[in-house]
Amino acid sequence: MIEHQYHREPTPHIFFPELLPPKVYSELVFPDIRPAPKGRVGRDLYAGEPGYAELVASPGWRDLHRTFTSAEFVTWILTLFADDLARLGCKVNPSKAVYEPYIESRDMVQDVRGAISDRDVNALFTRFDIQVADNDYSRYVHLDRIRRVTGCLLFCSDYSEEGLIGGEFALYRDRLFASDRRCLWPKLVKTFPVRHNTGVIFLNANTAFHGPRRTQALAGFRKWVYYAISSHQPVWTAQGPSRSRELCFDAKKAAVAMWERLRPRIG
Ligand SMILES: [Fe+2]
């Protein structure tokens, strides 16, 4: 469907070296997005909001949006990840999955509860969020919401044009992995630079630790689409908290605090 490069390690993911034919991509004009509350990165435009429908009907966007929000694309991605879905214990059964367009509102995005409705776990929808980040953008190493089957970034900007140093999308391992969907001791494994017309989709399994690397400089903006295939229900099973794990997190927090106090003296 789209040229793609599948990788199983460090966590199942697929790189898209070219999201759209170059001529089509060249027609895509990224919008100005004003800061607004309750979004993911501060400047977000979500389905159902003013200007969204017009944007995704415009040249370039039309093709990108149509492809990624189609039932065929969702089925294709589930097929590519089929072995991993079973191996990593995803509750979605690809043979029973049905694509049901659904608008998860700005308020709902913040919802970290298990289920957001009573729909069946195999009822899937997509998110296709327009995102803009400035110099303040930083995120810790994390997994996406437990209801997301996949997360994905579709880059619509280029580090060389935006004066971006750092800010690559990165995949990590947890050196003390415990399948509890929390990363205790991240080890950087793989990075993807912010380049026009490229993308990375990852299975949002318990191993899918990711985040942007620290932005060291950014004259313009980091612009991308956050795409996800999501269920209404939790699709992954996390190990419950344990006393030893909590002690490890407490010890890490204390060590980081001490390092922050000592660093100015060490220089
Ligand atoms: Fe994420």
Image (cartoon, rainbow, N blue to C red):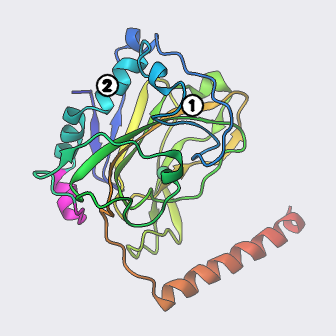
Locate residue 121: give its quadrant.
Answer: bottom left
Q: Name the amino acid, label 1.
A: Lys
First to last magenta residue range: 82-91
Left or right of 222: which side holds 117?
A: left
Q: Quadrant of residue 161?
A: top right
Q: Is the magenta stretch mostly helix, strand or loop?
A: helix
Q: Which disc number belongs to residue 223?
A: 1
User: Identity of the amino acid at label 2?
Assistant: Arg
Check the picture and name the quadrant holding the N terminus. top left
Residue positioned 50% across, 59% down in the render: 142
> Residue 222's x, y, as percent?
61, 33
Disc 2 element: helix
State how far apart marks 1 and 2 are (Cα).
Answer: 19 Å
Q: Which residue lies furthest to the left in this view?
A: 95
- Left/right placement of residue 29 relative to residue 74 reads right
Of residue 264 and residue 156, the one placed in the foreground of this image is 156
Does 118 sit above or below residue 24?
Answer: below
List the residue tagged with mark 2.
66
Can you say whether 133 is above or below 247 in the image? Answer: above
Q: Which of 188 and 45 is in front in this view?
A: 45
Q: Which residue is drawn at 38% across and 18% down?
A: 62
